[in-house]
Image (tube, helix red, strand yellow):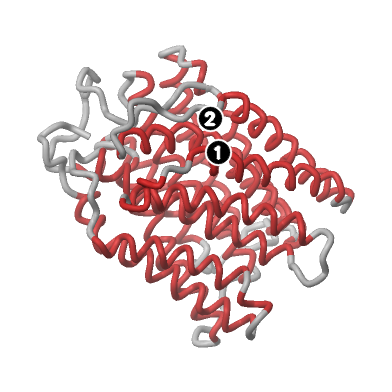
Amino acid sequence: MGLINLTEPASINNKGRFSANAPLWMLAFRPFFLGGSLVALFGISYWTLVLSGAVTWSLNLPPNVWHAHEMMFGFASVIAMGFLLTAAQTWTGVSSISGTPLIILSCFWLMARVLFFVQLPFNFALGEPVNLYLVIVFQGIWWLGGIMVLSKMLFKARNKQNYPFIGILTLLFIFNMLFLYLVIHQQSALALKLCDTSVFIFILLIGIVAGRVIPFFTARGLKLTEQVKCPRLDRCILFLTMGGILSSIGENLTSDKIILSIFVGGLACLHLLRSFIWWNKGIVKVPLLWSLQLAYFTLGVGLIGITLSFYHSQIFYKDALHMVTIGAIGMMIIAMMARVSLGHTGRALSPPYFISIAFVCIFIAAIARSILPSIINANHAWILSGCLWSLGFFLFLFHYFPILINKRIDGRIG
């Protein structure tokens, strides 16, 4: 697959777009990055209050199930969709979703978040709380709408090298619907296992996207003449991750962790190797580079932890998994949003110093959630991690909220 160019071409036809008076709805990254960041902030803040006992749980599904769903399918998925729908416009030269259709799609996503907290006084003949069925409907429509828009753009331009992203989003959509179906039928344990497998789908997405953008961003940011390329290693990571996804599904059915551990261990080594190949000492002076590289390095470390958890009783799978979900996925997301939001609004790629603090907060949150539970009281470690995560996204929103809702500073549409 080729490298991703994230600079919006001026030749794109913007016919039918909203005027500059409604910049929030000009490209999908704006409402989706904003919405996802708000879920990251308020969702984890609420979760932390529940863990601390300050708030009584009142939703009609287990708290850990809601937490897992909203972080994976409410937060991470909407950021991924916003990135892909925005980047696809650059890849294809075809206008992405904007204006009224984008507002409608965003409302479906928002309603799915809100409906978890709505207790409807009627159940019809469903025998279960109607609000969870409505979550499936609104979340499903949001997924299908985003996938259809991306597919239309890629197919129209015959952009075959990016067709795999359609498959990845479709797989996440299927897992999301199965997750909610199992929750409604009180199969929460199996739903959480599906969510764990969906983490590996996000690892596949990170493996592809990071393999394109990190060398590109590094070369641009450090003014290097060439990008670091390792195509054979890229292909090995791709195939090994697909094997990991299949073996994770198999593990859910058979509880046999041996095959999964082999794939995960091998994948950890390859990601760490690629991280070392990409390393350049110049990145330590550029927050938008070291944050991405640190997130990617943390992916390899987290996968090693997962592998060891299969063989060592003192290393817990969920703790190691959170090194991946917080330290790799979470930090990769906030670092990508920080870079893309500046580039796609015509601003200089130099965020203020406190954005570096935000990156550090997310990284320490990963350590607090993954390592501290074996040293101090686990609940205290979880609360500390939640507070650090919330602080990181508060700092992000403090700077990027006005950027995402205001027009580009260079006068272009996007």
- Mark 1, secondary structure of its residue: helix
Q: Nearer the viewer, mark 2 or mark 1?
A: 1
Depth check: give the residue in front, 216 or 343: 216
Binning the other alpha carbons within 10 Å of mark 1 as few (below 14), some (14 to 19) or many (20 upward) gives: many
Residue in view at x 37 percent, y 61 percent: 38
Residue in view at x 35 percent, y 42 percent: 104
Kind of residue at disc 1: Leu
Image check: 371 left or right of 394?
Answer: right
Image check: 53 left or right of 318?
Answer: left
Q: How many labels, in total?
A: 2
Residue in view at x 44 percent, y 61 percent: 40
Question: Considering only order in the chain, which callout, 1 or 2, is on the residue closer to the N terminus?
Answer: 2
Expressed as whole percent of the image width and height from the top left, the position of residue 156 reads 42, 14
- Mark 1 lies on residue: 205
Relative vertical location of residue 216 with respect to residue 333 in this rendering, above or below:
above
Residue in view at x 70 percent, y 34 percent: 242
- Mark 2 lies on residue: 165
- Mark 2, secondary structure of its residue: helix
Contact? badges 2 and 1 (CB < 8 Å): yes
Expressed as whole percent of the image width and height from the top left, the position of residue 21 reads 12, 42
Residue 282 is marked as none
Expressed as whole percent of the image width and height from the top left, the position of residue 2 reads 47, 21
Kind of residue at disc 2: Phe
